[in-house]
Amino acid sequence: MRKFLYILAAILCYITLSSKSCSEGKQNDDTSQEEKLIHEKADIRNEFESEFISEKSVHAFESKAEQKLTDLSDYLNILCDSSVDKSFKEQSKLMAINLFVSDTTTICHCLTNDTDLRKESIRNFLKAAKFTDSKKITLDSIRVTEQLHFTSEHRYKGLLAFSRRIKNISAKDTVWSVPASLQAEFFVSKIHKIFGKDTLQIWNLSLGNIE
């Protein structure tokens, strides 16, 4: 994406700074710019469509997986906030689901409830879980316990460990639950992505089962 922004900036800079009066010179410049864009696009295609993930990209995806867990806790706390509009909560549910491989990915209810060990799909989990103002969910101490590794064609898998804490708020006091140690799978696989008029097959990160 950074390279696409670079291309866009280069085009805007070219339009702003170039004012050729000679039509032949302008045509030559346009041809040169077009060739540059073709080369840039080829570089992007090679980077995104590579058959294997580089070591540098592995670390980047692992950091992104950790961030996705943090994003999940943000969405869960939005659902706990009664002051948030219902339509915004529905959007937060959708964004939470989009963090995962699919809406059938399994989630343990212990993510939001100390005593509930049921497991069901992320979609059903978000419907059934009790989200109230008296609860704040924190996911921290996130770390990679199983490095991202190749498992099958166009698919990598890794594992995160993290601590889940729940702050229960009442009129009298605030009590933190005993931290629960959980783990989350994460996957990197190929998906089709549209860039302008082109469709590229790129690597994409998603969370897996949480238990």
Image (tube, rainbow, N blue to C red):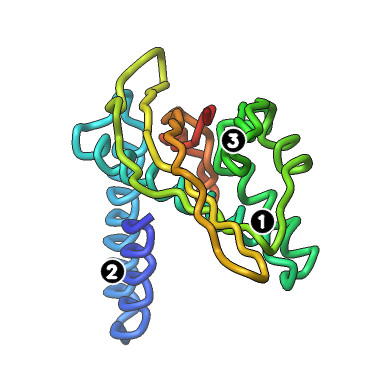
Picture coordinates of residue 31, whole percent (x, y): 32, 61
- Numbered disc in front, either 2 or 3: 3
- The answer to whether 15 is drawn above or below residue 190 in the figure is below
Residue plotted at (37% across, 34% down): 161
Picture coordinates of residue 92, whole percent (x, y): 66, 56
Q: Which residue sits furthest front?
A: 172
Q: Are marks 2 and 3 in contact (CB under 8 Å)?
A: no
- Look at the numbered disc 2 and give the secondary structure of its residue: helix
The numbered disc on residue 29 is 2
Closest to the observer, 120 or 1: 120
Q: Are marks 2 and 1 in contact (CB under 8 Å)?
A: no
Q: Earlier in the sequence, mark 3 or mark 1?
A: 1
Give the Cα separation between the discs numbered 3 and 1.
20 Å
State the residue position of label 1. Answer: 92
- Look at the numbered disc 3 and give the secondary structure of its residue: helix
Amino acid type, mark 1: Ser
- The answer to whether 124 is drawn above or below residue 68 in the figure is above
Picture coordinates of residue 113, whole percent (x, y): 63, 41
Residue plotted at (31% across, 64% down): 6
Give the Cα separation between the discs numbered 2 and 1.
47 Å
- Look at the numbered disc 1 and give the secondary structure of its residue: helix
Crowd rating for badge 2 (residues with CA inside 10 Å; few <14, some 14–19, many 20+): some
Q: Which residue sits furthest left?
A: 55
Closest to the observer, 26 or 75: 75
Q: Earlier in the sequence, mark 2 or mark 1?
A: 2
Q: Quadrant of the N terminus?
A: bottom left
The numbered disc on residue 110 is 3
Amino acid type, mark 3: Cys
Closest to the observer, 50 or 96: 96
Residue 19: quarter of image: bottom left
Residue plotted at (33% across, 58% down): 2
